[in-house]
Every structure is written in C-alpha cells, then in structure tokens.
Image: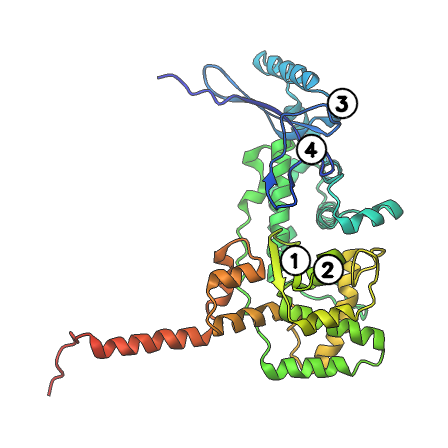
C-alpha cells in the first residue's frame, strides 16, 4: 500500500497594516484579504516547510510559519533557494536547522527570540492611539508586554530551579502555581484571579507551541501539553436598577469641578444609551457624531455599531469642551490605557458615593441596556446588534438568564397550555 507523502512547502509575505497589500476594509465596511502571494513591498517573508522521507514518510525536517528575516531573506527567489538547501540536507541525512536549534537552545535565548519575532510581526500594526506615543518613547505594544512579563517570570523561575536549556523544562505546573497577583503599595500581594491565571496559561501554551514550530524543542517533549485547562466560571452580570442609576447621576451632579462634572455626566449618559465599553466611549471621534447619534467600530470585536441617541444625550456631548481636534475626551497625548485608568478613577469615586457595591463598574451599563431591551420585548438578535457582539451565542450566554420577564411570560404560556391539553397523569389512589 503506498505511503501518503506529507511534504509541504509554502512561502508567503506578511504585510504590515500600512502596506497597500494588507487586509483592509473600505468605507462601506467590506473586507478585503491580504495578498500574501505578492512580494517586493519590503514586508517580512515567512515560510512553512515539511520534508518527509519518500518511502517511510518520516518527518526529516519541519519549519512551521517562521520568519525568514533572520536568514537575510528579502525576496521569494532567495527563500526558494534556502528551502532547496534544507531539502537536500534533510534527504542526504545532514543536520537540519531545527535539529541544531533543539540541541543548545537556552531558555533566555528562546525567550529573547520569541519577543524579537513578536515585535517584528507587530511592527506597523499600530492603532491610531499608539502612533504619536511610539514616536516619543520606545514602548512595547500591550500584546508584547503581556508576553514579556510572562517570559521574564519564566526566566527568573528557571534560574531559581537551576534550569538552563529549554529541553530541561519537563513540568510547567510548579511555574503556573507560583504566579501571584499585583503588589499593592502597602506591600500586600493579591492572589491572581482564575480568569487571569487561565489567560496567562494560554499565553504560555502559545509560546511553547511556537518554540515547537521553530524546532527549539521536540513536540513530544513539549511540557505545555501536560497542563490541564483552568476552568473559569461564567461571570454573572449585575445590571443597575433604576434607584442605583438615579443615585449615580445625582452624585455626578455634585462634582465640584465644572469641567469634570460636564465630562463625567456626558460619559455616564453615553455608557447608558450608547451600549459601548468605556474605551469605545472615551475614544469617540468628533466626525462620528451626527444629528441622530454616533457610529463606531468596537475595539474588542471590530463590529460596526450605529447607536441612535436621544437629543439630551447629544446635547450633553456637545457641551463637552473637546480634548483635541479628533476626539471629544482624548487629547491623543497619553496612551489609551492611561486615559481609561484616569476616567475609571473618577467614575469609581462617583460609584462609591452612590453606594454601588464594589465590583460593579462601568461595564454594567451594557448589561443594564441588554436587560432593559429584553424586558421591553427586543429579540436576542437586536440586543446582539446593539452591543456589537460578533456571535449571537455570546449574547445568549450572558443575557438569557437576565430577563426574568421573558421567563415569566414563558411560564404563563405553559400554564395556559395545561388547561387546553388533556392530562395523562394516573388517577390518585384512595
């Protein structure tokens, strides 16, 4: 019986966001995929190569989705020539690049290479709020920072356990169990939440998966495969009731600084009626404001949302002194994270004065709108569009249990059915 050959060769270009060949959307929101088979624009070239024995189908060499920049590859022709050399070396029994990497790759070297490759991939993929910051000071993107914090902890933990080579790590569970939360100014260290622990473990698995693709460790020796998933309970939404909303707006009216009073009132009204997250609310562009509402793309999902607003909300928004020519609340000089943190502190003061339980936050406004829409007869599809969810399942997951009125109506319909359909229950014994 012939053996199926699993050899594979693919060379493609990963275009930067500002490249004309990158994936993009037009003004009508139509998506156009990246032209990965177009070269010569200066974007990094990547390749995927799997070489198998023609008779036994044994994998002799594997190079998966790796950047060829470290081999000084700048054209497709050079990449083809490099893959040809690797193919001849593997078929003739000589050492391939992956085997050499697997023998002597140190943990620190592997971490540095991963971060270097990640920064290269992220180059040019800057959001509008990062462009000005990137020119002024060298700061990593938030995605790179997450990996850097994780890998710094891995290097420190490895040194404490006297581990030098990547292949010497055979169990990652002690490393995962050593994670702690952030340290407070008073010296107290918080416990890391289950959600944060789960997300960080997934990042760790991605790192080791990439090292396997690069050939730094063998797939059978990947210790991340033995980590069990951390189950995270679904968070229960806590929408604001009318009394809580009334107290929040009353406390916002008591803010002494008139500039901040106008700003906080406008933010609260937008959170209540626009159904957007705090980051989307604070980065509202002035050109997106019309006579009927605001249109925007959610930063988390990229979904287009057209939010119609009452006149008094638009009037409160017009009373705000714009922070810049482009944005209403954001000057563009600070990072988005700094902007959100600054407003979060201001809003927390209002919530605390209004007697809102700790743990409830600005995101609860989205839950409140969802509940109000469902209570007033809206469908799940209408709530999904209003909140900007990509999938209907996300909306159903969080908000099906919110609308008690819908459950009451369902139970009433079932009770009505009891009187119209016959009963097949056995007669009671005397």
- The quadrant in which residue 275 appears is bottom right
Mark whose residue sits in front, 3 or 1? 1
The residue to which callout 4 is attached is: 15
What residue is drawn where x is 48% and y is 68%?
378
Asked if residue 215 can be seen in this view, the reply is no
Q: Residue furthest front?
A: 291
The image quadrant where one finds the C terminus is: bottom left
Task: State the mark number for residue 211.
Answer: none
What residue is drawn where x is 80% and y is 80%?
255
Specify few, some or many for label 1: CA neighbours under 10 Å numbering under 14, 14-19, or 20 or more. some
Task: State the mark number for residue 295.
Answer: 1
Who comes first in sequence, dot 2 or dot 4?
A: 4
The residue to which callout 3 is attached is: 72
* Residue placed most toward the observer, 281 or 217: 281
Who comes first in sequence, dot 1 or dot 4?
A: 4
Specify few, some or many for label 4: CA neighbours under 10 Å numbering under 14, 14-19, or 20 or more. many
Q: Secondary structure at mark 4?
A: loop
Q: CA distance from mark 4 to mark 3?
A: 17 Å
Q: Residue furthest right?
A: 136
Could you tell me if the residues under marks 3 and 1 are in contact, i.e. CB atoms within 8 Å? Answer: no
């Amino acid at each position: 019986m012939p053996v199926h050959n699993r050899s594979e060769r693919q060379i493609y270009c990963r275009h930067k966001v500002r490249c004309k060949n990158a994936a993009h959307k037009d003004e009508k929101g139509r998506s156009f995929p990246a032209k990965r088979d177009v070269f010569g624009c200066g974007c990094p070239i990547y390749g995927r190569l799997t070489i198998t024995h023609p008779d036994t189908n044994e994998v002799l060499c594997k190079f998966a989705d790796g950047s060829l920049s470290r081999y000084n590859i700048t054209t497709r022709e050079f990449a083809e020539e490099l893959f040809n050399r690797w193919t001849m070396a593997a078929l003739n029994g000589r050492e391939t690049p992956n085997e050499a990497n697997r023998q002597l790759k140190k943990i620190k070297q592997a971490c540095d290479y991963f971060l270097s490759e990640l920064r290269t991939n992220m180059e040019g993929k800057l959001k509008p709020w990062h462009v000005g910051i990137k020119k002024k000071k060298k700061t990593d993107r938030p995605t790179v920072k997450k990996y850097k914090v994780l890998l710094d902890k891995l290097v420190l933990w490895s040194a404490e356990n006297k581990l030098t080579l990547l292949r010497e790590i055979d169990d990652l569970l002690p490393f995962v169990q050593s994670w702690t939360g952030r340290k407070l100014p008073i010296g107290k260290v918080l416990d890391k939440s289950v959600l944060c622990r789960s997300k960080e473990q997934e990042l760790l698995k991605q790192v080791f998966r990439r090292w396997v693709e690069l050939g730094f460790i063998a797939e059978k020796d990947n210790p991340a495969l033995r980590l069990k998933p951390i189950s995270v309970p679904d968070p229960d939404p806590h929408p604001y009731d009318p009394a809580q909303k009334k107290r929040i707006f009353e406390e916002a009216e008591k803010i002494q600084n008139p500039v901040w009073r106008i700003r906080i009132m406008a933010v609260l009204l937008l959170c209540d009626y626009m159904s957007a997250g705090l980051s989307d609310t604070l980065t509202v562009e002035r050109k997106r404001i019309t006579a009927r509402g605001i249109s925007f793309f959610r930063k988390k999902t990229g979904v287009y949302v057209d939010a119609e607003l009452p006149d008094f909300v638009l009037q409160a928004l017009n009373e705000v002194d714009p922070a810049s020519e482009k944005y209403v609340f954001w000057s563009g000089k600070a990072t988005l994270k700094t902007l959100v943190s600054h407003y979060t502190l201001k809003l927390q003061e209002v919530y605390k004065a209004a007697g809102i339980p700790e743990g409830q936050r600005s995101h609860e406004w989205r839950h409140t709108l969802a509940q109000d829409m469902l209570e007033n007869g809206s469908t799940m599809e209408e709530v999904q569009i209003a909140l900007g969810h990509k999938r209907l399942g996300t909306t159903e997951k969080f908000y099906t249990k919110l609308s008690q009125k819908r459950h009451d109506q369902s139970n009433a319909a079932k009770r009505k059915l009891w009187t119209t359909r016959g009963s097949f229950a056995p007669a009671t014994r005397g």
